Structures are given as structure tokens and as C-alpha cells.
């Protein structure tokens, strides 16, 4: 059986959320978002090797939160870097799995079915990401004008982004540049095809106060099920 490493990246400070507390620590129905994300993967499979990236200055705060909520989920805490790229590169040193999943710390609602579908796909490919179709109309900017484009040619990308370990390690030997928006972009630059699987709509990234309201509603709905 393949060993799975999961990097949960939470290196940001959440300026769009407002306030002094980084978004990953903001309570979602009384529990920090990041802790809910960690719990989500532990509940999917308690054998996952969990690695959390955080800015070094927030490590003590996180450790206090873990004690406060009496969490015993085993995980490795590594320092975040200047950019997400550097945080992931730091975390790779702690990964010992055959496959590596990279997930946003502020996406606490990834479905078990999504994760298992990604892992199943990795048995026949080297890179896989969950995506969603776009529902709204889409326009492309051209200077001061714009034109309508076919939305079926575009997809929304989610996490976890999932890779064979050798592929991801090789990708992170490349030099950082501002065009690297996610792990799949970096891996793709090696000439490796990215397989797409259907994501789940609840797997939202919480970055604004409005997102937090929606997340509270999702959590309330799940608790009713």
C-alpha cells in the first residue's frame, strides 16, 4: 500500500480577511479553520502523514491552540517561507510518502470522495488535480475592451493537488518566479500532463468575511446530515 504525505499549507497572513489574526486561525463555529482542515484529512485516513506549514512566528500560537482544543492528531510543523513556493519546498523535506497531496489550510471541506478519487488516479498518472466547471459567463479582457469566451473551455482549480513524490520533488528544484500560481503549474513546466478529476463544490477557499459566512452555512448543513 502506498504511503501518503499531505502538506497543509497555511503560510499566509490573510490580509483580505481583515484584522490581525491570520485567516487560518479564525474560528469556524468555534474551532480554528486550520484545525478543521487537519481534522478533515485525519478523518479521511488516520494513516496519512500530515505536515503543516506556518510562519515561524505563529508556531507557538498554533501549538497553544492544539492544546486548547485537546487535539491529538499527529502532524509535523514546518516553517513557512517568503512565498507559498518556499513553504512547500520546506515541507517536502519532511515528506516520506510515495504520493504527496498539497492542500490549502483554509479549505476545510474537501470531500473524502474527492481525495480518494485523486489517489486512485495517481495509480495511473503522475499528477492530478480536482476542478469545477464555471457556472457564470466569462469575459476576456483586451486592454480597455473585453469579449465573451466559451466558459466550457475554463475550469476552477481546487486542492489537494496530488503528485508522485519524485515528480513534485523534481519540480521544486526549479527556480521560483512570480508565474508559479500553484503546484500543478510548476509540475506542468516539466512537461508532465495534469489529469483532472471532478472536485466538490463545498471545497471552498475561505479568504474573506463573506466566505466565512458561507462556510458557517456549509458546516451547519453537514452537521444536520
Image (cartoon, rainbow, N blue to C red):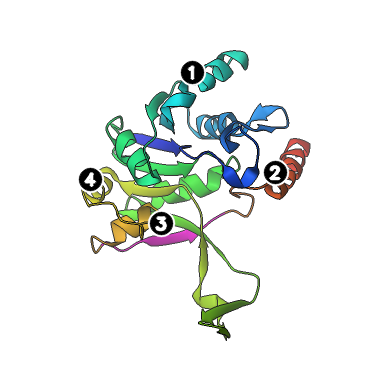
Which range of residues does the magenta coloring cover? 192-199
Going 39% across and 55% down the picture, which residue do you hit? Answer: 128
Q: Is residue 188 above or below residue 55?
A: below
Q: Which mark is residue 60?
A: 1
Which-is-in-front pick, marks 4 and 1?
Answer: 1
Q: Nearer the viewer, residue 145 or 214?
A: 145
In the rendered image, residue 209 lying in the magenta stretch gets the answer no
* Residue 155 on image: x %, y %: 51, 67
Q: Is residue 1 visible?
A: no
How many numbered marks are there?
A: 4
Mark sitting earlier along the chain (3/2):
3
* Residue at position x 64%, y 50% in the image: 202
Label 3 and label 1: CA atoms lie apart by: 29 Å
Task: Give neighbour class at mark 1: few <14, some 14-19, many 20+ (Cα, 10 Å).
Answer: few
Comparing 66 with 178, the one in front is 178
Q: CA distance from mark 3 to mark 2?
A: 23 Å
Determine whether 44 is above or below 204 in the image: above
Residue 153 percent across, percent down from the top left: 50, 76
Q: Secondary structure at mark 2?
A: helix
Question: Residue at point 24% right, 64% down?
Answer: 191
Comparing labels 2 and 4, the label whose residue is closer to the camera: 2
Which residue in the protein does label 4 denote? Answer: 166
Name the residue that disc number 2 marks. 212
Q: Are marks 3 and 2 in contact (CB under 8 Å)?
A: no
The CA distance from mark 2 to mark 4 is: 36 Å
* Tag 2–tag 1 contact (CB < 8 Å): no
Q: Which residue is mark 3?
A: 181
Amino acid at each position: 500500500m502506498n504511503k501518503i504525505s499531505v502538506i497543509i499549507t497555511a503560510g499566509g497572513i490573510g490580509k483580505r480577511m481583515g484584522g490581525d489574526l491570520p485567516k487560518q486561525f479564525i474560528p469556524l463555529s468555534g474551532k480554528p479553520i486550520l484545525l478543521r482542515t487537519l481534522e478533515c484529512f485525519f478523518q479521511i485516513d488516520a494513516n496519512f502523514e500530515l505536515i503543516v506549514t506556518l510562519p515561524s512566528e505563529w508556531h507557538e500560537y498554533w501549538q497553544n491552540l492544539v492544546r486548547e482544543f485537546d487535539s491529538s492528531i499527529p502532524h509535523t510543523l514546518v516553517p513557512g517561507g517568503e512565498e507559498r513556493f518556499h513553504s512547500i519546498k520546506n515541507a517536502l523535506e519532511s515528506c516520506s510518502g510515495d504520493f504527496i497531496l498539497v492542500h490549502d489550510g483554509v479549505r476545510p471541506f474537501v470531500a473524502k470522495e474527492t481525495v480518494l478519487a485523486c489517489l486512485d488516479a495517481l495509480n495511473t498518472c503522475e499528477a492530478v488535480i480536482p476542478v469545477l466547471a464555471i457556472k457564470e459567463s466569462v469575459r476576456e479582457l483586451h486592454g480597455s475592451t473585453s469579449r465573451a469566451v466559451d466558459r466550457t473551455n475554463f475550469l476552477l482549480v481546487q486542492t489537494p493537488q496530488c503528485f508522485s513524490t519524485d515528480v513534485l520533488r523534481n519540480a521544486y528544484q526549479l527556480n521560483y518566479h512570480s508565474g508559479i500560481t500553484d503546484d500543478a503549474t510548476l509540475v506542468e513546466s516539466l512537461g508532465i500532463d495534469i489529469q483532472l478529476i471532478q472536485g466538490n463544490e463545498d471545497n471552498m477557499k475561505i479568504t474573506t468575511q463573506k466566505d466565512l459566512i458561507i462556510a458557517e452555512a456549509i458546516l451547519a448543513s453537514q452537521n444536520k446530515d
